[in-house]
Image (cartoon, rainbow, N blue to C red):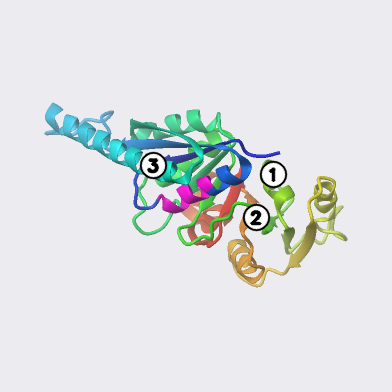
Amino acid sequence: MAYKSLLTVMTETTQSDSALAQVVALATAQDAHAEALCLGVDRSQTGYYYAGANALILQETLNRANAEAEEILAFAKDFFTKSGVRWSAESGVAQIADLGRHVAHRARFSDLVVLPQPYGENRGVEAEPIVEAAMFEGHTPVLIVPDSAKIFSKPGTILIGWNESVEAMRAIRRALPFLIAATQVRIVVIDPPRHGPDRSDPGGMLSQMLSRHGVKCEIDVLSKTMPRVSDILNRHAVDTQADMIVMGAYGHSRFREAILGGATRNMLEQSSVPVFLAH
């Protein structure tokens, strides 16, 4: 059981090294095919009318996006060629309002999409829509790789953020190739409910299910000693020297998370280890 089609989406070259390195490491370990979609983003928004804009200005923005796409394609080709893995790369231009359609189409035919952290310094506005398009329209799990993350080919310790949600269970099932290969999987339950069928054994049923796949599980029940669940997960990841965190994405609406914040957004902003997400 392995991921055989690995996709990364690139809209620039300065923040893509970690994601590309992770794709190469996984492709090497799992004998998979690595693919890069290299997009130049046309930010002119030609669907709207700007007073004073003319065809020359619009053509200039298109030419700039084409040049960026070719530059990104050359970068990806050079990176993959040096790696020795099976690979393919393709360039294209997309308007920022239509970016999701192109990403979703490619993601739909991939086993896993590997992307850089969408929030942080020097991140483009297109980074977040790319993550969401892969998950929501492409229906594909996403592995987010922070710039400073340790690249792995086979995960040692994996944390599962378990809150009994549909999203969390879907992420766990999609992450089974990683979980089976891991040296240790820690099911992290934060402030489990005091009432309910699993109150006496939080995480027990999940541990049983995973153990039947040969996954080596432990259950960590943690108190909510910090205001945000994401802070506790991140601290526990550091304490246990985890290689990856698996969690469900966007239990609340994306609009609510964008305005008020939420565990998914906070994890994508702050995690120092790769985060595996599915919705």
Given residues 49 and 42, the one toward you in this image is 42
Q: Position of residue 224 (x, y in %)?
A: 68, 68
Instruction: Give the class, few, some or many, for how many residues have Cα within 10 Å of label 3's Cα (few <14, many ≥20).
Output: many
Say which residue appears at 64% left-offset and 71% top-offset. 239
Instruction: Please indicate, yes or no, whether residue 44 appears anywhere in the rendered image.
Output: no
Figure quadrant of the C terminus: top right
Q: Quadrant of the N terminus?
A: top right
Q: Position of residue 82 (x, y in %)?
A: 42, 45
Q: Which mark is residue 177?
A: 1
Label pair 1/3, CB-CB below 8 angstroms: no
Q: Secondary structure at mark 2?
A: loop
Left or right of residue 135, residue 12 in this image: left
Q: Which residues are magenta?
A: 16-24
Secondary element at tag 3:
helix
Tag 3: amino acid = Ala
Location of mark 3 (residue): 76
Residue at image x 51%, y 55%? 268
Tag 1: residue type?
Pro
Q: Which mark is residue 155?
A: 2
